[in-house]
Amino acid sequence: MSIAASDVKALRERTGAGMMECKRALEESGGDADKALELLRVKGQAKAAKRGEREAADGLVSHYVHANNRIGVIVEVNCETDFVALNDEFKQFARDVALHIAAAAPNWVSEDDLPEEARAAELAIFEQQASDKPENVRAKVAEGKLRKWLEEVVLLNQAHVNADKYEGRTIEQIRADVSAKVGENVVIRRFARFAVGDPD
């Protein structure tokens, strides 16, 4: 089928992908822009996964202070080059992550940062809570509760608080999209969240 140049241009503006990539995605999806967008996202995440091995030693520190001046966040987001660190999309991602951390208050960046004893302690609680369930489903119930808990306390597992902008996508999905668009490994390295009156 023939794809209009205006459709290719519109998809490129939405995704930041190359013209030929956009054209191929539109051809593959039969001209459906939303399906083409999803195809590009999946391909971009596959490329981003390959980039995950490359060292992200550049980047920036971003911050967010809530309007009431009672919550503040500092976050370090890394990439591979200073060129990308100056990219508006990268800077916006870092700011949006800081804003999200202020609102969602995660404990850890990734599941790899979660101490094994913390995971084991939560799982033990969930297993205890599931003790009144039939024996053959107890482990599954406890595992389900653990997954839900990880979505609450691990930054990359959380859906971004700005649902209008990010449509329920997780921080990890957004990070992979940004990585695909900028063509470099993008890593949220660490963060600190401060709230007036917090004991620590």
Image: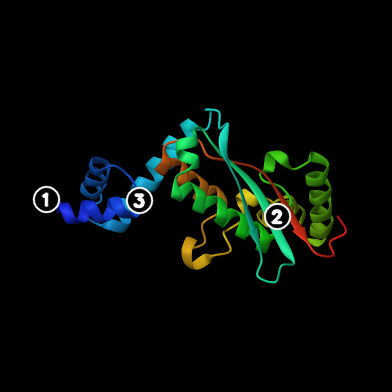
Q: Residue at x 71, y 51 (%)?
A: 143
Residue topped by disc 2: 106
Q: Quadrant of residue 158?
A: bottom right
Picture coordinates of residue 75 (x, y %)? 65, 48
Going by the numbered disc 3, the residue's amino acid type is Thr
Picture coordinates of residue 138 (x, y %)? 75, 54
The outermost residue toward the top is: 54
Q: Residue at x 82, y 61 (%)?
A: 132
Per the image, label 3 sits on a secondary structure element best described as: helix
Picture coordinates of residue 20 (x, y %)? 23, 41
Side of 119 where 87 appears, left or right: left
The outermost residue toward the right is: 199
Question: Measured along the vertical axis of the image, is residue 148 above or below residue 56?
Answer: below
Foreground mark, 1 or 3?
3
Estimate the spatial distance between the alpha carbons at disc 1 and disc 2, rounded to whole Å.
47 Å
Picture coordinates of residue 185 (x, y %)? 50, 35
The earlier-in-sequence mark between 2 and 3 is 3
Report whether residue 144 is seen: no
Estimate the spatial distance between the alpha carbons at disc 2 and disc 3, rounded to whole Å.
28 Å
Going by the numbered disc 1, the residue's amino acid type is Ser
Label 3: few (<14), some (14–19) or many (≥20) C-alpha neighbours in 10 Å: some
Foreground mark, 1 or 2?
2
The earlier-in-sequence mark between 1 and 3 is 1
Q: Any mark on residue 68, and which? A: none
Residue topped by disc 3: 15
Is disc 1 in contact with disc 2, using a CB cutoff of under 8 Å? no
Q: Residue at x 18, y 56 (%)?
A: 6
48 or 36: which is nearer to us? 48
Residue topped by disc 1: 2
16 or 163: which is nearer to us? 16
The earlier-in-sequence mark between 1 and 2 is 1
Label 1: few (<14), some (14–19) or many (≥20) C-alpha neighbours in 10 Å: few
